[in-house]
Amino acid sequence: MKSIVVLISGNGTNLQALIDAIEAGQIKGRIRAVISNQADAFGLHRAQEANIPTVVLSHRDFADRLSYDLALMEEIDRHQPDLLVLAGFMRILSDRFVEHYGGRMLNIHPSLLPKYKGLNTHQRAIDAGETEHGVSVHFVTPELDGGPVIIQSRVPVFSDDTAEELAARVREQELSLYPLVVKWFCQDRVKMENGEVQVDGKPIPAEGYAAE
Ligand SMILES: Nc1nc2c(c(=O)[nH]1)N[C@@H](CN(C=O)c1ccc(C(=O)N[C@@H](CCC(=O)O)C(=O)O)cc1)CN2
Ligand SMILES: NCC(=O)N[C@@H]1O[C@H](COP(=O)([O-])[O-])[C@@H](O)[C@H]1O
């Protein structure tokens, strides 16, 4: 049974999908703690409802990014996670932090990486006239949203889409994709070796698997 710590900043729909998948017996893992940098994150309520310990560690209480990351590492390591899951965690993490969790830290990003790294991905895709968009699950590396992709799921972009409508279409894919990857990790099926993703011991395409 792998131990998991989840970092959030907001609503927590991805966290809820993981909670539900674990409770349904689909993931052989246990969320030991949910940590948020935002005290008003609704995801904290979701964790409390599921009897998962919660911690708020605000970046505003620290002089700089590294001191925050060191305090965050100390809190995370109290729970001795096998896996650290970023689920809408909206802080850029220092190299020191990322290297400490190398190969056991995942992120879900609302774009078809390497396109649209960073924020406001849906509006940027619409503004660029994209006809498809989507979501990527990747291992986290120091390069922001530059880590090796494990799997992607694509959605159409309609000409009259608002960013909210596109986000909702992407979100639907997120909520099944993240539990699938966490399940694979807990089964020791997916690893990061030398900066590349291996599934069942074999390298996968650079852009990751394409979700059905
Ligand atoms: N070193 C890394 N840190 C993080 C990664 C990563 O791949 N490498 N992934 C991000 C998640 N993320 C997109 O998927 C992301 C999160 C936050 C930001 C950002 O610009 N944050 C600002 C604050 C924004 C805010 O508070 O609203 C900041 O940290 O100054 C970009 C992308 C998690 N971290
Ligand atoms: N750059 C990171 C990023 O934008 N992540 C995105 O934040 C949302 C969190 O929603 P949630 O709190 O409801 O899971 C998700 O859509 C996720 O892809």
Image (cartoon, grey):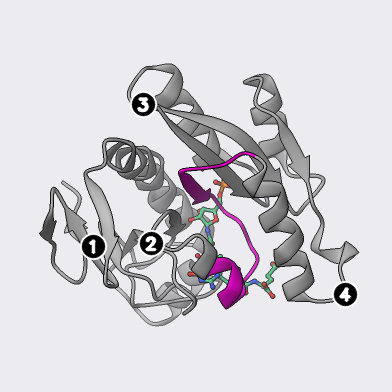
Of the pair 132 and 195, the residue shown nearer to us: 195
Rendering quarter of residue 192: bottom left
As for residue 81 lying within the magenta part, the answer is: yes
Q: Earlier in the sequence, mark 2 or mark 4?
A: 4
The residue wearing badge 3 is 28
The residue wearing badge 2 is 139
- Position of residue 111 relative to residue 82, above or below, is below
- Looking at the image, the residue that sits furthest to the top is 24
Q: Are marks 3 and 2 in contact (CB under 8 Å)?
A: no
The residue wearing badge 4 is 63
Rendering quarter of residue 64: bottom right
Q: Are marks 1 and 2 in contact (CB under 8 Å)?
A: yes
Please identify the dominant SS of the magenta region: loop
- Image quarter (top left, top right, bottom left or bottom right) of the N terminus: top left
x and y percentages locating residue 3 in the rendered image:
49, 35
Three-letter code for the amino acid on which mark 1 is drawn: Val
- Looking at the image, the residue that sits furthest to the left is 202
x and y percentages locating residue 15 in the rendered image:
54, 38
Residue under the point 80% across and 63% down? 59
